[in-house]
Image (cartoon, rainbow, N blue to C red):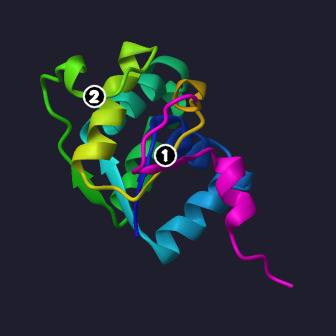
Amino acid sequence: MKVLVDTNVLISAILFPNGKTAEVFSYIIKTHDVIICSYTIHECTEVFERKFPAKTDSLTAFLSNLSFELFQTPGTIDPKKYPYIRDAKDLPILASALLSDADVLITGDKDFENLHIPRPLIFTPNQYFELMPKNG
């Protein structure tokens, strides 16, 4: 299964390695094909440089040690070709999820909650965590 992860999921997994989102991310990279789009990498870099400048090396190290498919987000996206999403900044993630043929999108962004599309399936990290097999 191909799983595209949104920016907020990647940032949480890096900054909070013992958190639930990191556990979800760890499970996904072990059991599925991870897709990260170029827009997410750009957005992560921007957020780290602005909010966590002392941790930019963590982002670089995380990405360089991760096996994932890099999907090139289109430079120009016609919003009329995609389902409506309230925040225009989320359109590149939506377009990447659809164009990359992802089966699942994992995002903590509330703007995706009201998006009703057949594919990819959209889960928050908490929702996906509840679907994961539990040890014990």
**For this view, does 4 lie left or right of residue 110?**
left
Q: Which of 100 and 18 is in front in this view?
A: 100
At mark 1, the secondary structure is helix
**For this view, does 75 lie left or right of residue 24?**
left
Are there few (<14), some (14-19), or many (20+) residues within 10 Å of tag 2?
few
Task: Name the image quarter holding the N terminus.
Answer: bottom left
Residue 2: % across, % down: 37, 64
Magenta region, residue range = 114-136
Residue 99: % across, % down: 22, 46
Tell me the quarter of the picture where residue 113 sits: top right
Tell me the quarter of the picture where residue 81 sits: top left
**For this view, does 124 lie left or right of residue 29?**
right
Rendered position, 3 above or below 87? below
* Nearest to N terminus: mark 1 or mark 2: 1
Rendered position, 81 above or below 30? above
Residue found 38% across the figure and 46% down from its top:
60
Q: In the rendered image, which residue does mark 2 sit on? A: 82
Q: In the rendered image, which residue does mark 1 sit on? A: 58
